[in-house]
Amino acid sequence: MLSRQQLDQYRDDGYLVIDGLFSPAEVEVLRVASEDPVVQQQLGERGHANRIVHLLEITAKHPAFKELAMDRRITDLIAPLIGEDIQLQHSKLATKPPKKNAGEFAWHQDFAYFPHTNYDLLAVMVMLDDATPENGCMSVVKGSHKLGVLNHLRDGYFTGMCLEDKYWSDPSKIVPIMPKAGGISIHHCLTLHASPANISGRPRRGVVFQYRADDAYQMADHVWVDTGLQVRGKNREIARCDAGALRLPKRRNWDPEFGNMYFQSGKQAREWNKAPAAAEVLSAES
Ligand SMILES: O=C(O)CCC(=O)C(=O)O
């Protein structure tokens, strides 16, 4: 259960750190799962020895991670923040290499990647190693979840990073997020956050779950294999639309899947739309 003070902190500052949620033995089970040969092979293919890797769909790669995503200690804790009925939006193992000075992740808001019909989404990061400034722990801009969606686009295309650097220029607003192994951080989907390079010479591993209220419907970006996993309560099949006007994260060279705002038309209509409209042809002829 979150205390009144924790609820107020989440509402006012847009983040929380909770230590000691999982025991050292449970953390060890997760570390062993992250050493699984399939997981290690996929991390290797993505170059985790030299750069930050977010290995997505981690709940589908080892049962320990699916159990963790559904653990009542997490889902009951976040219910007062986003509601009783909760789905997973995505999951990942977030690794930073032991190689010094690698693993930086630029300032961004998660919601800008995958806009939904409302803002009841949050990320939980379960630490498998103590998070410290040396190993590139996340930092947040306190209170930035109240700024709305900031610009992450250049020339109309999504860049994956926020372009409004004035928001992290005041050091008094930057808070390092330092849960110990077995602890978690929670941040609102609009909280600006980043993580610097790992200079510790040791790995930094965390499991990230993005959770959403079941009435938050996704308008853009990927639908992963575990997107929509019901982790608490039920799916009421109601889309609550109170996110306002949103610019969607259009990507270059990307064929969007069904279920987002870029895929709202039938195959034939898309073909027809590529040809000049009949009205345009007529006006050109006259
Ligand atoms: O792995 C990290 O340190 C960055 C995580 C992050 O920014 C995210 O998952 O959105």
Image (cartoon, rainbow, N blue to C red):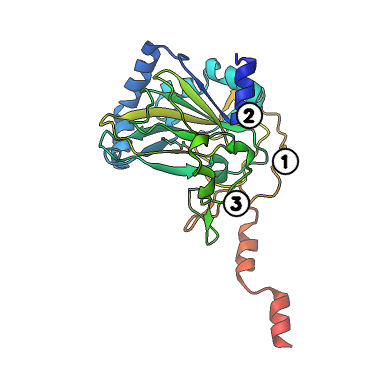
Residue at left 64%, top 28%?
A: 11
Residue 35 seen in this snapshot: yes
Residue 15 image-quadrant placement? top right
Q: Quadrant of the C terminus?
A: bottom right
Question: Of marks 1 and 2, which one's residue comes earlier in the chain?
Answer: 2
Q: CA distance from mark 2 to mark 3?
A: 27 Å
Question: Of marks 1 and 3, which one's residue comes earlier in the chain?
Answer: 1
Q: Secondary structure at mark 3?
A: loop
The residue beneath circle 3 is 248
The reply, left or right, for residue 243 in relation to residue 274 is right
Q: CA distance from mark 1 to mark 3?
A: 15 Å
The residue beneath circle 1 is 241
Is the distance from the Cβ of mark 3 to the nearest ligand 1 atom less than 8 Å? Answer: no
Q: Nearer the viewer, residue 258 or 268?
A: 258
Residue 9 drawn at (x, y percent): 60, 24
Task: Select label 2 or label 3 by which is in front.
Answer: 2
Residue 12 shows which numbered tag? 2
Q: Is residue 189 above or below residue 263?
A: above
**Which amino acid lies under the numbered mark 1 shown in the image of this protein?**
Cys
Q: Secondary structure at mark 1?
A: loop
Q: CA distance from mark 1 to mark 2?
A: 23 Å
Q: Which class describes the residues within 10 Å of circle 2: few (<14), some (14-19), or many (20+)?
A: some
The reply, left or right, for residue 172 in relation to residue 268 is left
Residue 201 drawn at (x, y percent): 25, 31
Farthest-out residue, bottom: 286
Residue 10 image-quadrant placement? top right
The reply, left or right, for residue 198 in relation to residue 156 is left
**Which amino acid lies under the numbered mark 2 shown in the image of this protein?**
Asp
